[in-house]
Amino acid sequence: MTTGTETVRARAQRTFRDHLDLLSAGRIPEWVDLFTEDGVLEFPYGPKGYPREVRGKAELHAYMKNFPEHFQVEFTDLRFHETTDPALVVAEFRSRGTARATGRPYEQTYISLVWTEDGRISRYVDYWNPLVAIEALGEDADDMVAAFGD
């Protein structure tokens, strides 16, 4: 028998898996729909000039709409860490891919903290190494910053 806690946890983890699947498929409008109306994506390790956070569906779409043009990526090695809050996902995973403009590899390691509400992402804190993206996209942080948004 499934408890309410197990149901919430399974739904939160399904939302996270959907996030990875949609992002790797380049289906950005559907990816944005995984977020609540005021959902926020945070980047604690972003370099100078990179946003610290992106808030709301319009900003999320503007920020990520060019991702499929810049990266071909597959997410692997997903591991969830159980939390006392079943709506909170703590995930470790990797990416394997290519920066399309340079042909350079994009192999990243992530740790993500993702809060969900009713199967939607309300807050996503993305811990990743920006140096990997900079090396894949060009020679400096400006190349990476320019790859996202308008």
Image (spheres, rainbow, N blue to C red):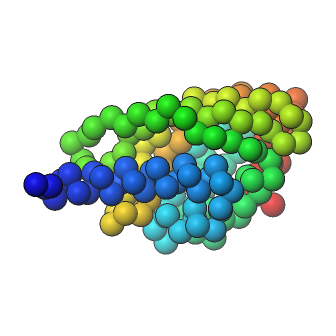
Residue 56 lies, in percent from the top left, at: 55, 67
Residue appearing at x 41%, y 34% in the figure: 79
Quadrant housing residue 3: bottom left
Quadrant housing residue 81: top left
One can see residue 115 in this view = no
Q: Is residue 141 left or right of residue 54?
A: right
Residue appearing at x 72%, y 61% in the figure: 65
Quadrant housing residue 110: top right
Q: Is residue 43 left or right of residue 72?
A: left
One can see residue 9 in this view = yes
Residue located farthest toward the left when viewing the structure as drawn? 1
Q: 97 and 147: which one is in front?
A: 97
Residue 149 lies, in percent from the top left, at: 76, 57
Residue 64 lies, in percent from the top left, at: 69, 57
Residue appearing at x 16%, y 59% in the figure: 4
Quadrant placement of the N terminus: bottom left
Residue 68 lies, in percent from the top left, at: 75, 53
Residue located farthest toward the front when viewing the structure as drawn? 1
Residue appearing at x 59%, y 56% in the figure: 22
Q: Is residue 97 above or below residue 29?
A: above
Q: How many labels does the image show?
A: 0
Q: In this view, does 24 lie to the left or right of 20?
A: right
Q: 87 and 71: which one is in front?
A: 71
Quadrant placement of the C terminus: bottom right
